[in-house]
Amino acid sequence: MKAVSFLVTSEDHGRPLGDIAADRLGEAGRVAAQRGGLWLGKRRAAASTLAIAGETLSVRFPPTHGYCDAPLTLENIIYEDNDVLVVNKPPACYVGDTPWDTQGSVLAVVQRLLTVRDGVPPVLHLAHQLDFGTSGILVLSKTPRANAPLQTAFARGLAMKQYLAVCSGHPPVTADLVTGHGRAAGGRWRLYDQADIGRVLPDGQRVRLAHTRFTLRRQFANAALVEAMPLTGRTHQIRLHLAALGCPILGDERYGGVVDVAGLHLTHPLLHAAELQLPHPIHGRSLHLFCPPPSLILTVIDRLRQ
């Protein structure tokens, strides 16, 4: 069950939406309301919002694995000053709000951790995004004055990023992929020919440039460890480009990656944001950040070596 919608009746007019969800759906509705899963049309609604008769209330639920808080502690902080916070994002968690949950993301958990530590709720904003399955360096602003410069650095290619990926097959020693990038007719991300860059798609969006450089770091029997440098920041860019090379990332089932590897069942792509260099948003001096791979990637590499 992903979502349930129903019309607010005259009997429920003026009641808190959370109470209505709990009455209609029991404990599942109550928890969904607490986690931010209530919607009126395209607008998220608080559990305390008073209902208006005739409105359509939607209650959104998480995937089958249920609600999950990002497994972070203060030890996940890589770097921090008055304006910038950098954390080591674990794999298999969302960085921001999802349609069914506002409480379990990296952003929400870090806000709670800093509130307990400092006694004051922080003002945090994500400077960029990492996929659900991707681990590693995630940058947040702590002050409004840092937010725009950080986002500009990522948008304009001033942030130099290095990723590690464990992929299948035999990738070239070096590769430089330049393609178009946009959504397919079904809404999923896909690559386009360079000649299509700038073309307007049926959804009104344009095909945009996607550019990634790859370097082979270690070749195994039928898999490899590669370093990826994305020179643009398109959604799923590294995953799509490695799949285009015929070497999808292990665990990346969406783009053809193998999910059973060396006795392990992988539930997310083995992709890690390992290194980042960018100008500090206030004083401009270069920040050079490093983050070791998570234990799962190290375990897979060790088994592939054997």
Image (cartoon, helix red, strand yellow):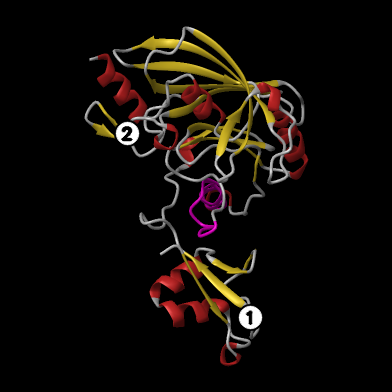
Q: Residue at x 76, y 38 (%)?
A: 148
Residue named by callout 1 = 50
Q: Residue at x 58, y 40 (%)?
A: 184
Residue 120 image point, x, y percent: 62, 54
Where residue 24 sits, quadrant-wise, is: bottom left
Instruction: Reply above or below: 251 against 290.
Output: below
Q: Are marks 2 and 1 in contact (CB under 8 Å)?
A: no
Residue named by callout 2 = 259
Q: CA distance from mark 2 to mark 1?
A: 46 Å
The residue carrying pointer 1 sits among few (fewer than 14), some (14 to 19) or many (20 or more) residues within 10 Å by Cα, namely: some
**Where does the C terminus fall, quadrant-wise?**
top left
In front of the other: 141 or 196: 196
Residue 103 image point, x, y percent: 51, 57
User: Which structural element holds mark 2?
Assistant: loop
**Where does the N terminus fall, quadrant-wise?**
bottom left
Q: Tag 1 or tag 2, which sits nearer the N-term?
A: 1
Where residue 48 sits, quadrant-wise, is: bottom right
Where residue 137 sits, quadrant-wise, is: top right
Residue 55 image point, x, y percent: 63, 79
Amino acid type, mark 1: Leu
Q: Residue at x 72, y 31 (%)?
A: 155
Left or right of 214? Residue 200 is: right
Q: Which residues are magenta?
A: 99-115
Residue 153 image point, x, y percent: 72, 29
User: Which structural element holds mark 1?
Assistant: loop
The residue carrying pointer 2 sits among few (fewer than 14), some (14 to 19) or many (20 or more) residues within 10 Å by Cα, namely: some
Q: Residue at x 45, y 73 (%)?
A: 29
Q: Spot the residue most to the bottom.
A: 11
Left or right of 217? Residue 184 is: right
